[in-house]
Amino acid sequence: MKTETTMKTNLFYKFSVLNILAAALFVASPVRAQILGIDAANSFSTNVFYDSMSFNALLQPGANYVTSANPWNGSAMGINNVTDPTTGDFANASLNAAGGGFVYSVALNNVTLTQTPTDTGYAESIYLFQVAYSLGGSGLPSQATLYPNLQVSGIVQNTGASFASLTGFIDYYDVDVTGVYTLLDTVSYNFYDSNPGPFNNVLVSSSFINGITPVLPANSTLVLLGYFDFKVDPASLSVETVPEASSSLLLGLAGLCGILWRRWAVK
């Protein structure tokens, strides 16, 4: 009888701990949310490597390079390892988007822009994109505005007025079933460095107007319209998206639930 009571107590304890962790995930996650996915027909992404304002020692300009996806399903796209033969300037970039449940995301990764130190003028890379997330019958509850946190590294050359910069914004819209757009929030980005020498793993300054998106109605569309502009003169600039703390917390709690369950299951 004592053994049976002890087993029941242990089992109750195990499920209680798991329930507490699950409750934490529940509280942190509005389960009523329902993002069905990306509406590719109303989404697009364009990346332009502007090198026509960069000049070699003979004052010959570079060319411009464009890659675009329209419609766009959110898969990674961008300028792929392009070196201009006239200036020697280099560009690479990747942008992707995803969405499901209550989470939507846009991420910049493997972004590199380099202007040859002996060139004049500047090299530039621009992203313009729109991603439309279809909402289901549950709509989307009010929650913190989700946006990419960007981190930059690079080198500013010691040649007078050299600099590396990143500017941009993401506008958040609700589009109702009649096609009417309502602006919900705007996140802005700004980075500028004119100090000669390297900079490493610097978080890009970001700010928002509201920081919260309101309740979105059933069967509407959440649209993110974004623009990023990278410039180097002459310098090199690399950009990556770093995880948000809240995302790491949810993944950590979920992982802990799994570890505890497996450990107890074998006892």
Image: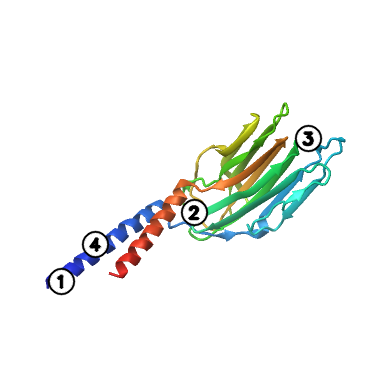
Sequence-wise, the earlier of marks 2 and 3 is 3
Residue at 32% across / 65% down in the picture? 263
Count of marks, rendered view: 4
The secondary element bearing badge 1 is classed as helix
Residue 254 in the image: above or below residue 91: below
Sequence-wise, the earlier of marks 4 and 2 is 4
Q: Which mark is residue 118?
A: 3
The secondary element bearing badge 2 is classed as loop
Decide which of 174, 177 is in the foreground and name it: 174
Q: Is residue 12 left or right of residue 50?
A: left
Q: Residues within 10 Å of mark 4 (few under 14, many from 20)?
A: few
Residue at 65% across / 30% down in the picture? 196
Q: Identify residue for label 4.
A: 13
- Tell which tag, 2 or 3, sits nearer the viewer: 3
Q: Identify residue for label 1.
A: 3
Name the quadrant containing residue 135.
bottom right
Residue 166: x and y, percent?
64, 38
- Give the distance between the C-alpha atoms of the residues marked 1 and 4, in whole angstroms: 15 Å
The secondary element bearing badge 4 is classed as helix
Decide which of 21, 35 is in the foreground and name it: 21
Q: Identify residue for label 2.
A: 140
Are dots 1 and 2 in contact, CB under 8 Å? no
